[in-house]
């Protein structure tokens, strides 16, 4: 195809397409970037249209349009578009297979050098006029309104139209020949998607369909296109900033793969960050699960006496320690034989405290993670009592063996002084060795064994040492201890027996006895003396009338006294006696004010035997005139009723009482004045007011008004019934 037959797209200007002899050039991208690139001979490769003369001259083997386009697109990544951006069916021509070459075709004539047009300047990307012309430059001005827009475009635009470059026709690249643009035989036409966006308005017209050969004509088989030549050995990788193409074989991939690859390269930091985030989340989740799991369990690497307790709860650790401690016995051999428990030898294991120490690392999150790289060996918490061990070991000596005995200090039989018990020489056992064995068993939680032999031993506490302690105790007893009353008129002095009871002698095997003053006993004595001084207040009771005037005083109010320095006196006496000095102190007191309880009585009640409140029910028993009267306040509501009170030998009680029990009918019994027993059945309307004294009906009596009962108030049956129904439990009864 000749230039005058080319569509406008194929006649677009190209500059410096001849890359022969050039090493590098500067390509202006649409973004104004300039990047050095190694030249490749693939753009100058011969096509199937090359004539024999060119092949004989050593031209490279023919390369398909796909190869050239792929290389061109790789050099112009910013012009690549996806299939979605490609022109629609109304814009892009349909792909037409290339016609079979005519074997008789005459090679195209060599281009006339005079016909080669001058190089076209490229806006924005042109080199300095004073500098040598670059061998190849990409246009950057792709605006439709700019001069040369759509004309000075890259060679890939022409290749996108479905043609291959051939060196048979001149090009506009600075006087260098431009290969002819014909469809590539091995590409079956180029898809529109490889065309840059700038090429869309210049889509070539669809070529006419080839003529159908006659039936009797057999078309000659087309020559197979030559295999594409590999890039020359001197072609290096494209320099940084370009998508390299060295050694790339023809690809069937869509041209949009370059843009996709670019986007993929831009996305890889996101995927790496996402993967890192997932890893961190997984790590954090695992760490949280670990920390939560061991919040109440012993952390890894925790041991107690060499036993691994990791993963155990506090309760499980306590149970384990207690079980092993119970089995940690001490076997004693030698002159005596026994199997002693830790308790026998005065040694105890604190399983609770040991478990707390084992769980200490679990309480802190940092310590839980530190446990992953450290060991946590817990020592068993052990306590020992030498006196208990001494008692046990000495008790192993048989009774027929004379034991070494220390001198002792005891309270004398008179209870007022101290004396000594002499010491004696004899055999003994090494208690310290037994204690040490028990400690080893406790700390290791494992059984131990020891050999104990008799040793002749003098007493560890001599008679002289004991006597010195007894003398000191007697000196304390001799000190005077006195406490006086606030007015100084009275005093309280502790006797020798009391002071001796305050002194405590502490004795332990192999040690000199010690003395102390029992402060609790001193305080008890001081408190007892203070009660002689202290007085409880007596609260007064008085009756007042409706106007508030005091009518009478039933109980006189008396202020009380309270001792306030009992504790201070006890401490002072304890310190003085313990230092062997006398003590004299004084009680300190304060007054406790008595209170008054006022009772408002009914008007007129002040003249009665009982001053009742207004409306208050009460019963007056007048033993003088043998009558009973019922009152409400100061008003008589029933009576007087004649009665029979107690005989002189069994008189009726006097005083103020209250009805507390009632029976409609009851069998009554008691003792006569001579001691004999009486029984009276079916006694009606019984109202008890004190012990066995009661109001009741006496149907066996025909008259009243005299003394003759066993102490009860005998009444006519109807009167006793009235009292029974009117008086509630709690009603006041005054007998006088």
Image: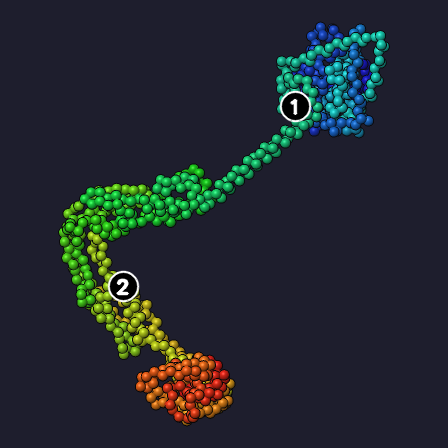
Q: Quadrant of the N terminus?
A: top right
At horizontal 64% and vertical 30% (from top left) the residue drawn is 266
The residue drawn where x is 68% and y is 19% is: 251
- Find residue 42 and report its image quarter: top right
Q: Residue at x 69, y 8 (%)?
A: 58
Q: Residue at x 42, y 88 (%)?
A: 700
**Discs 1/2, front:** 2
Report which residue position mark 1 lands on.
243
Rendering coords of residue 609 (x, y %) = 43, 89
* Residue 651 x, y percent position in the rendering: 36, 88
* Residue 393 appears anywhere in the view: yes
Give x and y (percent) for residue 678: 36, 83
Neighbor class of circle 1 (other Cα within 10 Å; few <14, some 14-19, many 20+) is: some
Residue sitting nearer the eye, 415 or 210 = 415
Q: Eyeballing the image, is 363 above or below 148?
A: below
Direction from residue 646 to residue 114 in the image, left or right: right
The vertical placement of 503 against 702, above or below, is above
Q: CA distance from mark 1 to mark 2?
A: 102 Å
Question: Which residue is under mark 2?
Answer: 518
Give the side of residue 573 with respect to residue 635, left or right.
left
Q: Is residue 371 left or right of residue 257?
A: left
Q: Secondary structure at mark 1?
A: loop
662 or 308, nearer to the observer = 662
Tell me if label 1 and label 2 are in contact, CB under 8 Å: no
Please tell me whether mark 2 sits on a helix, a strand or a loop.
loop
Q: How is the image coloured?
A: rainbow
Q: Is residue 130 visible?
A: no
């Amino acid at each position: 195809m000749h230039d005058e037959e080319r569509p406008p797209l194929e006649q677009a200007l190209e500059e410096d397409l001849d890359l022969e002899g050039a090493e590098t050039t500067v390509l202006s991208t649409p973004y104004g970037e300039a990047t050095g690139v190694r030249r490749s001979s693939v753009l100058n490769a011969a096509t199937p249209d090359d004539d024999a003369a060119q092949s004989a001259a050593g031209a490279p083997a023919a390369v398909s349009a796909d190869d050239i386009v792929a290389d061109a697109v790789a050099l112009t990544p910013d012009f690549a578009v996806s299939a979605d951006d490609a022109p629609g069916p109304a814009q892009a021509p349909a792909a037409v297979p290339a016609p079979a070459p005519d074997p008789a075709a005459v090679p195209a004539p060599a281009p006339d050098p005079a016909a080669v047009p001058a190089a076209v300047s490229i806006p924005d990307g042109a080199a300095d006029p004073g500098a040598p012309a670059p061998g190849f430059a990409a246009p950057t001005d792709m605006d439709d309104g700019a001069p040369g827009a759509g004309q000075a475009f890259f060679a890939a635009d022409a290749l996108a139209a479905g043609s291959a470059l051939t060196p048979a026709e001149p090009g506009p690249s600075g006087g260098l020949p431009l290969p002819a643009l014909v469809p590539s035989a091995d590409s079956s036409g180029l898809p529109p998607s490889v065309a840059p966006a700038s090429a869309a308005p210049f889509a070539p017209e669809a070529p006419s369909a080839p003529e159908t050969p006659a039936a009797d004509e057999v078309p000659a088989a087309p020559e197979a296109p030559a295999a594409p030549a590999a890039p020359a050995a001197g072609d290096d990788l494209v320099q940084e900033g370009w998508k390299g193409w060295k050694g790339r074989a023809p690809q069937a991939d869509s041209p949009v793969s370059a843009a996709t690859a670019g986007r993929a390269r831009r996305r890889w930091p996101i995927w790496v960050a996402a993967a890192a985030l997932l890893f961190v989340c997984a790590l954090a989740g695992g760490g949280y699960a670990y920390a939560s799991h061991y919040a109440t369990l012993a952390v890894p690497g925790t041991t107690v006496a060499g036993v691994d307790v990791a993963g155990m709860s506090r309760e499980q650790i306590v149970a384990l320690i207690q079980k092993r401690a119970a089995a940690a016995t001490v076997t004693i051999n030698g002159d005596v034989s026994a199997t002693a428990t830790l308790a026998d030898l005065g040694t105890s294991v604190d399983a609770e405290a040991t478990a707390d120490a084992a769980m200490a690392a679990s309480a802190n999150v940092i310590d839980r993670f530190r446990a992953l790289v450290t060991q946590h060996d817990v020592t068993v918490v052990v306590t020992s009592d030498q006196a208990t061990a001494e008692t046990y070991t000495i008790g192993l000596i048989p009774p027929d063996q004379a034991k070494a005995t220390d001198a002792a200090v005891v309270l004398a039989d008179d209870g007022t002084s101290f004396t000594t018990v002499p010491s004696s020489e004899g055999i003994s056992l090494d208690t310290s060795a037994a204690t040490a064995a028990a400690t080893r068993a406790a700390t290791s939680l494992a059984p131990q064994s020891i050999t104990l032999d008799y040793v002749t031993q003098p007493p560890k506490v001599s008679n002289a040492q004991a006597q010195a302690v007894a003398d000191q105790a007697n000196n304390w007893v001799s000190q005077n201890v006195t406490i006086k009353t606030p007015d100084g008129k009275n005093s309280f002095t502790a006797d020798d027996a009391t002071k001796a009871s305050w002194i405590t002698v502490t004795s332990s095997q192999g040690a000199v006895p010690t003395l102390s003053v029992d402060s609790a006993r001193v305080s008890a004595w001081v408190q007892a003396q203070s009660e002689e001084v202290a007085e409880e207040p007596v609260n007064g009771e008085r009756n007042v009338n409706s106007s508030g005037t005091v009518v009478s005083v039933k109980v006189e109010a008396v202020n009380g006294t309270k001792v306030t320095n009992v504790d201070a006196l006890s401490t002072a006496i304890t310190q003085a006696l313990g230092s062997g000095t006398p003590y004299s102190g004084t009680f300190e007191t304060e007054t406790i004010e008595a209170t008054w309880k006022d009772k408002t009585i009914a008007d007129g009640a002040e003249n009665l035997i009982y001053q009742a409140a207004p409306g208050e029910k009460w019963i007056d028993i007048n033993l003088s005139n043998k009558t009973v009267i019922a009152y409400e306040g100061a008003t008589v509501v029933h009576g007087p009723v004649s009665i029979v009170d107690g005989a002189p030998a069994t008189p009726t009680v006097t005083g103020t009482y209250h009805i507390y029990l009632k029976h409609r009918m009851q069998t009554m019994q008691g003792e006569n004045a001579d001691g004999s027993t009486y029984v009276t059945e079916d006694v009606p309307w019984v109202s008890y007011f004190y012990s066995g004294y009661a109001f009741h009906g006496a149907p066996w009596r025909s008259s009243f008004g005299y003394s003759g009962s066993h102490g009860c108030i005998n009444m006519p049956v109807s009167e006793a019934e009235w009292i029974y129904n009117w008086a509630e439990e709690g009603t006041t009864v005054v007998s006088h």
